[in-house]
Image (cartoon, grey):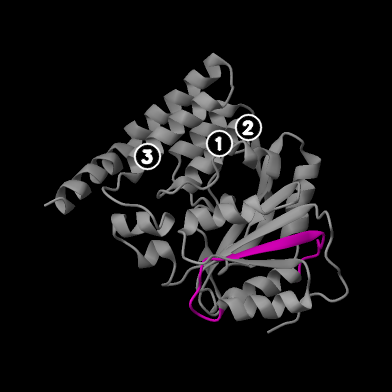
Amino acid sequence: MAAPVPGISSSSSPRLSLGLPVYNGERFLPACLDSIFSQTWDNFEIIACDNASTDSTGAILADYAARDARLRIHRADANRGAAANFNWTFELARGELFKWCAADDVLQPTFLARCIEALDTDPSAVLAWSGALDIDDDGRVLHEIYDNRHPMRFDAATAAERFHALVCWDHSCISVFGVARAAAMRRSSLIGPYVGSDRTFLAELGLQGRLVRVADDLLLHREHAGRSVNEIADLRRRTVWFDSKARGPAFPHWRLLREYLRAVERSGLPAAERARCRAGVARWVKWGAWRQLRGDIAYNLRHAR
């Protein structure tokens, strides 16, 4: 286990807050923390929210916190679901900038510096993100993440263009792990208690400003059997993963449709621009989401028997 960067004390007012939601992350957590503490940008705090882990996650966090005061640990008494745990890290943040860190991912040393530089260079940007490579359990690069070379338009000039790209395109949502302006995040719904809420969050940011991608692949995204998308195929169980209090039927795609439309109406954009955004939601349904909407209904009819 590599030691964190020595000689750097915690800041009373860090510019950047890193939210680290974790549950039973003992296998990959040390590599994640090592990569954070090896960043060339050091004016940050880490808010680790342990979602009532039952493995050695707590001990690992305590060991790192003893060596670097920038790491603050909070532990839930009971598992509250992934969405609440993600949002808890943001609620505790003090920085003007914020980034979520997945406990199984690894950052290249210049990730933070490059993203912050992009935001400082472009005041119209609300989030800066990097390309990503998929890595295996042992950290070996497998390949580029599937949408790494897609010509994303998340940085388009108008809100409607950005919203259309974020809603209609089949993208990995890896940009949710970029560096964002905390003020823009506060105007969003953050991560909702339903499947796909990271897409809504990004779409809400896109309504506010540009999402800019820095050159190079600076995020190493862990592709392993324990990822929720690989481990939990059942729609009901995945809904409960997001929200431990979820009960009854699961209609996540209908919820996504509703939240897209609500985001447009709450955006404060001119009427004509909101109309163009609503047209983007209609295209999302027409171009294939109708299958998922129908699938929600079919799933619940099957499980109601």
Q: Residue furthest right?
A: 7
Q: Which mark is residue 269?
A: none
Report if the CB atoms under discs 3 and 2 are less than 8 Å apart. Answer: no
Q: Nearer the viewer, mark 3 or mark 1?
A: 3
Q: Which mark is residue 204?
A: 1
Report if the CB atoms under discs 1 and 2 are less than 8 Å apart. Answer: yes
Q: Measuring 55% from the left and 51% from the top, which residue is drawn there? A: 149
Q: Quadrant of residue 6?
A: bottom right
The quadrant of the rendering that contains the N terminus is: bottom right
Identify the residue under disc 2: 208
Q: Measuring 24% from the left and 40% from the top, which residue is drawn there? A: 294
* Visible residue check, residue 288: no
Label 2, residues with CA under 10 Å away: few <14, some 14-19, many ≥20: many
Q: Which mark is residue 255?
A: 3
Residue 287: x percent and y percent?
A: 35, 35
Secondary structure of the residue carrying tag 1 is helix
